[in-house]
Amino acid sequence: MSELESVIGLCRMVQSGKIEPFDIDFDYVMSVIQKHYPDIKNPRDFCMDAEALKELSLVLERQNQWIEHKSTTLYKDPFMLSQSLMALDIGAIADIFLRSWHPLVEMEQMSAATLAASLSYWGDLVPFAERWQDSEVEERETGIATRDEARQLGYLPEEGFTDIIEAFWRELGERVGPGGSIEYWDWIGADTYEQTVYRAYLTVFMVGYGYANATWNRMMDEYTIIHKETPEPNPEEAKISLSVLVDYEEWKLWRNE
Amino acid sequence: MAQRMSKAQQQYQRKLKDAVHLLFFTHHKLPGVRGWELRKELGSDWQNVLEVLDKQLQPLDLQVTQVLDDPDIIDPTNAQLQDARYYITMRGTVTQKTAKTIGWRIDDIAGLAVSVAYIISKQGKSPRQDVERVLEEKLPGWRVKINIDRYINQGYLGEDEQGILFLDWRSRAEIDSKKLVDLVVSYGKREQESA
């Protein structure tokens, strides 16, 4: 392990709480980084140098937090605190804790409405014997298919995934206009549930790959999909993570509306 | 006018009842309700409703507790209040006898107290092995591991992928950290003076 790697490891120990922030000698770490800087020859060395600087700056941040923590009323010398803890017997520690403990109150209750809903669910539930019927498996000869044949059989999409996403983005643009927005369900909703799931699935990638934006209105508990005039696609690095939200009941409600 | 007042009062009473239902009964995997959920159900005066509810709970030795995502915030903004979690907790404290009746052994309570105080002294996070080492001074080793897992399951402690322990949501909701640390230190000082 190189000297620079040891320094990075040392700085990381502060982040994980294994050593105190002020156990790190800033000047020493800086001198190591400076010493190695003229020897940089390739991108790997550059990355290592940048990594060391980043870790050192995080140490400085922790040192700052440590000073802030020390200035609060919560701060007590860790050594004194641990000595006090060790000096106390178990009964005294428990007693001290109980004087600063305000347990949560939480209740669970079955209501008549919940019972009625559960009974109706039970009525609709298909018996195990019907649900888990053995599927009839038939032995088939294996064979070889070309890519075109696989496409014809529907195992492979006709076009590339990026083409599908781009066509989807163009559809969004045509529907809401450049930079326009549309409510999530109005965008993904289709005549069949399968088609709705498919549109929700594509929307996840369209947003994740940078073709559209999604905003969530907490108050109304709903998403809005916003068309991006200039997409910034980068499938390697998804920018936003959006869950696939296609509840069957919600779809039925949307369709009836 | 009198009828209008009474309607307003009725509406407020209904909001108080809704607040009780939201705060007392478990709705999610974790107890407690976010500020924005309360606002959605109770309307824009949700904070006033909570204040009134808190006063009404006082004689029952209960209180409405607010826990901010960032415990260091002193003067929260409206947005931070909507992100905060709200719980019903005991206003007072419990005796050892009561703690036993709700399923806590004295060793478990002491272990939790030491873990929490130790993590606070380490600025909010500490490697699990360090906490285990401290607990092993007074508790059998096999029990220490079980206890720490239990504190994690109950939400008092959290553990990240690197085995670093930190104070989790339940500690922030239930434990008065400042009082705990003050009591430990003052108890230690008293012991030293009397020695």
Image (cartoon, coloured by chain):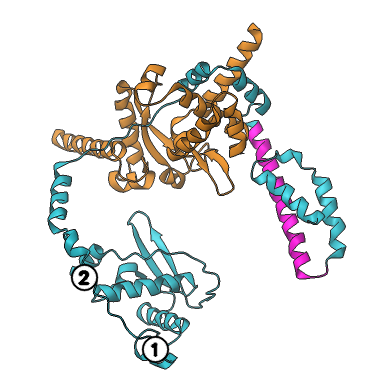
Chain colours: A cyan, B orange
Name the quadrant of the C terminus of chain B: top right
Counting from the top left corner in percent of width and height, residue A78 is at 66, 28
Q: Residue A126, relative to residue A30: is it above or below?
A: below
- Residue shown at 38%/38% (left/top)? B86
Q: Predominant secondary structure in magenta?
A: helix
- Assess whether residue B41 is covered by the magenta stretch: no
Asked if labels 1 and 2 share a chain, the reply is: yes
Mark 2 closeness class: few <14, some 14–19, many ≥20 residues within 10 Å: some
In the image: residue A41, left or right of residue A186 = right
Q: Check contact, mark 1 vs mark 2: CB within 8 A.
A: no
* Residue extent of the magenta highlight: A41-70
Q: Vertically, is B3 above or below B56? A: below
**Circle 1 Cα neighbour tier, 10 Å, few/some/many (<14 / 14–19 / ≥20):** few
Say which element carries label 1: loop
Badge number at residue B25: none
Q: Choose between B46 and A247: the one closer to the eye.
A: A247
Percent across and percent down for residue B117 are 56, 28
Residue that carries the numbered disc 1 in the rendered image: A143
In-image side of A213 versus B185 (left or right) = left
Residue drawn 36% across and 20% down? Answer: B98
Distance Cα–Cα, label 1 vs label 2 = 43 Å
Amino acid type at circle 1 is: Gly
Residue A227 position, x and y percent, is 43, 74
Give above or below for A200 relative to B174: below
Q: From the image, which quarter does the N terminus of chain B lie in?
A: top left
Residue designated by label 2? A255
Whether residue A181 is visible, yes or no, is no
* Coordinates of residue B81 in the picture (x, y in percent): 43, 43
Q: Chain of mark 1?
A: A
Above or below, B167 relative to B39 = above
Please, which chain is the residue tagged with disc 2 on?
A
